[in-house]
Amino acid sequence: MKYALVNNEKVEAVKGQVGICSVCGSTVIAKCGNYKINHWAHKTKQNCDAWWENETIWHRNWKNYFAVEWQEKIFTDDATGEKHIADICTDSNLVIEFQHSAIKPEEKISRENFYKNMLWVVDGTRLKNDYPKFQNGTFELIGKPAEPTLFLCHNPQSAIPKMWRNSNVPILFDFLGLEENIPQNDIRQFLFCVLPVIVDNKAIIVRMTRSTFIYNVQNDAILNYLNNLTREIPELYRKLKNMQTQRLVQHQLRLRYTRRRFSRRF
Ligand SMILES: [Zn+2]
């Protein structure tokens, strides 16, 4: 964990310090070595948050964009007493989970049910095939090629990892991970959000810049932002279908015209 309680204050790990875990109340020890990022560790992990995963620099980088008060917020289910730490929880109680490790489908669903109002940011670099598969997806622009850009993904079954398809909450892929020296015009500089909607068995993807996402989260407006985009989809899709129908009619007209000429000549 990035934070523990020392004299009732939420503080980062400093070498030699001892703190209290804000989830389970047990003693945690500051780990400040050369190999792992500074963190607080339990003497024994039992009875603490079973969903907690060891943090990577990728996690930390993401969390650090947001207010300290929003980081590592504890959620308690009043009925069962179940407690979990959300990576980020905004003032409007939107939870953002940064997911690097593999996660079981049951746990993913449990987390979504527990937090309810949430979205995931997934490290798309952990598995080496996820990005090439995504790149090979068939994407069709809907609406204008502006920021953000909306796409229909015609083959979500092959382009989007199974785990993150058909979700009930938005899923954002970060295909850049910790890679440096990636050109500014590389597509991985964007984040790709799979919206929780399916249109004719196609997924809807929002391509947005990192700064758009970060700015909207910092202003606690990301859910509104995504909801507004989602509301536009039926109309955009209808226009796209109309255009496709027109193109088809034009194509058929041309064919008929060609056939007519053909029959006249012979
Ligand atoms: Zn604990």
Image (cartoon, grey):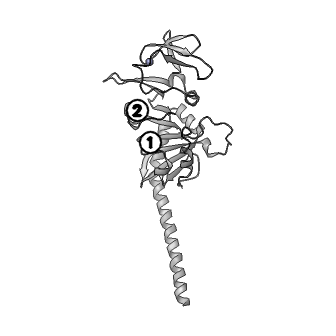
Disc marking residue 260: none
Snapshot quadrant of residue 56: top right
Secondary element under disc 2, as helix, strand or loop, is: helix
**104 in relation to 249, above or below:** above
Indicate the amino acid at tag 2.
Answer: Arg
Disc marking residue 111: 2
Q: Please state which of residues 75 and 134 is positioned toward the viewer in this rendering.
A: 134
Snapshot quadrant of residue 124: top right
| Front: mark 2 or 1 | 1
Q: Residue at x 52, y 67 (%)?
A: 247
CA gap between label 2 and label 1 equals 14 Å
Residue 9 at least partly seen: no
Question: Disc 1 designates what residue?
Answer: 163
Snapshot quadrant of residue 47: top left
The location of residue 17, given as percent across then percent down, is 55, 10
Q: Crowdedness of circle 2 by 10 Å Cα count: few (<14), some, many (20+)?
A: some
